[in-house]
Amino acid sequence: MDLDQLAALRTPEGSAALTAAAGLAGGDPLAAASALRAAGVPPTLAAAALTQAELRHRAVGKFGSAAAGMFLTRPGLEQATRRVVADRRAARLSAAGVRTLADLGCGLGADALAAARAGIRVYGVEADPVTAAMAAANAEAAGLAELFTVECGDATGFDVSGVDGVFCDPARRASGTGRRIFDPRAYSPPWDFVTGLAERVPRTVVKVAPGLDHALIPAGAEAEWVGVDGDLVEAALWCGELAEVPRRATVYRQRGAETHSHQLTGSGATEAPVGPVRGYLYDPDPAVVRAHLVAELATELDATLGDPSIAYLYADAPIHTPYARCLEITDVLPFSLKRLRALLRDRRVGRVEILKRGSALTPEQLRRDLRLAGDEAASLALTRVDGAPTVLIGRPVH
Ligand SMILES: C[S@@+](CC[C@H](N)C(=O)[O-])C[C@H]1O[C@@H](n2cnc3c(N)ncnc32)[C@H](O)[C@@H]1O
């Protein structure tokens, strides 16, 4: 997509093409293209409208119904923050007194739009001209063009002296190849610039990939890991006045039509106690594990680790928690394929879910090797207990 194609999509003719394309998204792309052409839409406009319709369709999971009016690029959508996460971050910034915010590398504007919805005046800077134009179009489509404006340029040259907060979500994909960048030092804007922002603006938040090495967390910053329904989606560094605790795990859980957020906080430096395997196994959410808050969760659950290096917790009681999955354990066996296969055969187990921590076994291979038969279901956890390869058999506690 180039700037001319985007401009064409924003004309009345383009808007009609987008509406027609929306009804065709998710189906056969060739049939959709012929249907648009048969309706008199010029081929280039039809192609651009279909691409947008396809991306909007995919974006519903991140942005809900607002996706229907947004302009998107594939890499922009992949890197954009989910609406629930962006809204909560914006609410926290607003509660901390941020009224004006620079979003340095604003992409398609998912975070900036959330801040604007929270009443914050946002100055977005985006290096890529098409992405910048789309962000501006997204602000207009959301009725937020007065609160969120976008300038196309290099964020490193933006004068941050006039704002009371800065947000930066550096690009974690190589421009050109689109490949994921794992080393923050290769981010754009560059890592030194990003971490240096906190020294210039006391209320700075930086979004980073959840694989962030703890050694790169700036001194005094709060590091937050975010999980959505069991998936680890991002980490954020809250710097200066915004840091409230050393570590935080924010876990979002969907219940019916609503999403609830839960927060576990702590030092991230405490070791959980070690003890025997007990009646219930807790498998902590990846956000809790990455935030190094397993010890804090152990305290909440009155639980212990079975092995000091493995983040499975064991307790005597099932406690409802948003921070972990819970299994009631029926059997604990030293790992032996033969014994496990015989036991599952005896119990007529035909379906297993396989969890693992601290085991080199591949669940798919094990499932094949077990040659299951029967109508019953079971959960298996492959792990080590006190250093020994062990399999726990159980069932989920809901
Ligand atoms: C991860 S995306 C931002 C996503 C955004 N927070 C959202 O949720 O929609 C990072 C963006 O920064 C832009 N970028 C990278 N380096 C930049 C620079 N030096 N100046 C301005 N923008 C930059 C990229 O083009 C990309 O669109």
Image (cartoon, rainbow, N blue to C red):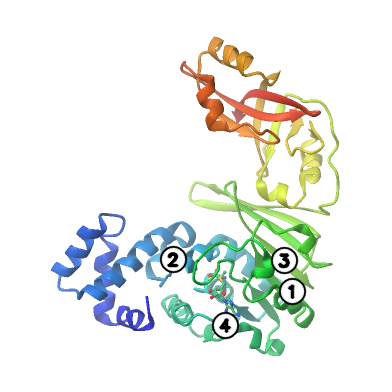
Residue of label 3: 237
Residue of label 4: 125
Label 2: few (<14), some (14–19) or many (≥20) C-alpha neighbours in 10 Å: some
Residue of label 2: 74
Residues at marks 1 and 3 touching, judged by CB atoms closer than 8 Å: no
Query: Which of 264/46 is in front?
Result: 46
Q: CA distance from mark 4 to mark 2?
A: 19 Å
Q: CA distance from mark 4 to mark 1?
A: 17 Å
Q: CA distance from mark 1 to mark 3?
A: 9 Å
In the image, the residue with mark 4 has its CB under 8 Å from the nearest atom of ligand 1: yes
**Mark 1, secondary structure of its residue:** helix
On screen, residue 8 above or below 276: below
Q: Earlier in the sequence, mark 3 or mark 4?
A: 4
Q: Quadrant of the N terminus?
A: bottom left
Q: Is residue 89 left or right of residue 72?
A: right
Q: Earlier in the sequence, mark 4 or mark 2?
A: 2
Q: Where in the figure is residue 138, as x and y percent of width and height?
A: 44, 76
Residues at marks 4 and 1 touching, judged by CB atoms closer than 8 Å: no
Q: Amino acid at mark 4?
A: Val
Residues at marks 3 and 4 touching, judged by CB atoms closer than 8 Å: no
Q: CA distance from mark 3 to mark 4?
A: 20 Å
**Mark 4, secondary structure of its residue:** strand
Q: Earlier in the sequence, mark 4 or mark 1?
A: 4
Q: Earlier in the sequence, mark 2 or mark 3?
A: 2
